[in-house]
Amino acid sequence: MRFIRTVGLASIVAAMALVGASSASATSTQLCKVHTGLTCPGGQATTSVHMTLASGSVGRILSNLATVLCLTVLAEATPLGEGNPQSVHTLAIEFANCGNTAEHTNCYSEGGIEVEQLPLVTLLKTGLDEGSVTATNGQYRLICEDILGFIDIDCKFNSTGMLLAAGAQHLTANKTPITAVGDKSLCPDEPKLDGLLKTLANSYILGNSPPSPSTVLCKTHATKCEEKDQVKSLHLVTTKPPVLYNTVANIECESSLGTATVLGPAEPQKLDFTELTWKECHTRGAADNCTVTSKSMPTLDLKRTALSLGTATTLGLKVGIDCTILGLIELDCVYGSDVTLQAEGALHKEGSGHGMFTASKVVLKKLEGGGHCPESVKWDALYEPLEHVYIVE
């Protein structure tokens, strides 16, 4: 049964890894003893796989020379840790009753199948209860007597690149090609493997989907922010006078304050403002001749972009400006736009203090007002949290 052994060995090993494929994942694959979800629970990883021919089936090697049958196939393998794909080592393979005669005994090797190199295969989850197994190496020797009644063969095969399909606790070889190597005289041309293997114990192919990216403001600088350290509310104050630049008269305020409720980790994380105020606003050379107010409370979409860095996009921001300039020009205008502020965590760079949210002359467009109201203003401000915050995942 040398012929079938050669082909069967790689497939069987592959089969072990592949049998029982479950849902697809581009990130990881793991054989598991139970199927209670998409990922394998702790302590339930498959560490040993045993396979045999499915009931009522035989292994077959198809070639231009003859079809060799193998009535018994047993295999054992060890899956390694979760991976993309997962690696599986073959430990042993046993074949019996193999040949192309009625007795199925004319293909053999003393002491069992001669494996010149046990194969390593990789298992990749590809879909719902589907997977693929690829042999990365493996070499075998096939010896048969009296093929066609008068031909003896002694051939070598390599399983590198062999691809098998699996699902529903079965591994399927469907006319799967194997590669003849070395002296090919009297060896089958383009041999193919047919067979159906089944695991002796349930083994499912599970895996982790890529974790959804998330952003979270955190009180500590940690790789993962624990619930107790997540920022729930944010208090901001400007560290320099904020300015609304425009074509009529720039408006400067002594300070601006903000308070926001911070929602849970998400991508992006939401910050709902409950307060956004400007104090002691005026045009150049004047005193308290302007009032700047929030006409609606904005939200911020905070998204981490790098280590302790991010962007914060405003949604629903509306700023009212009411000024009397030189006693002659009246401004009664409302501005707003979805603009992006740059966000920095406390430890990003020297001088960032507790962290920073920077509006660097971002453009707010006119929403209401006529007469002397400029078509837009540029908001320039630097807000610092009252306590350390870090932007983490």
Image (cartoon, rainbow, N blue to C red):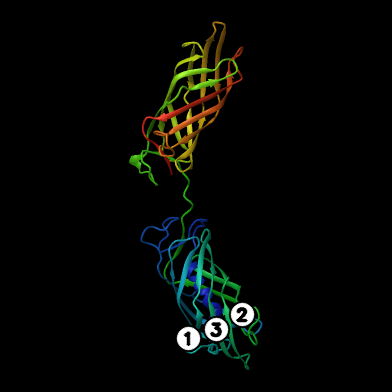
Q: Position of residue 315 (x, y in %)?
A: 51, 29
Residues 156 and 108: in front is 156
Quadrant holding the C terminus: top left
Residue at horizontal 55 percent and vertical 28 percent from the top: 362
Disc 2 on helix, strand or loop? strand
Cα distance, mark 1 to mark 2?
20 Å
Relative to 322, residue 70 above or below: below
Cα distance, mark 3 to mark 2?
10 Å
Residue at horizontal 50 percent and vertical 60 percent from the top: 84
Give neighbour class at mark 2: few <14, some 14-19, many 20+ (Cα, 10 Å): many
Q: Which residue is mark 1?
A: 112
Residue at horizontal 42 percent and vertical 30 percent from the top: 384
Q: Are dots 3 and 1 in contact, CB under 8 Å? A: no
Q: Which residue is mark 2?
A: 180
Q: Which residue is mark 3?
A: 141
Give neighbour class at mark 1: few <14, some 14-19, many 20+ (Cα, 10 Å): some
Residue type, numbered disc 3: Arg
Residue type, numbered disc 1: Gly
Question: Count of labels shown?
Answer: 3
Q: Nearer the viewer, mark 3 or mark 1?
A: 3
Q: Position of residue 123 (x, y in %)?
A: 50, 65
Query: Is residue 20 visible to us here?
Result: no
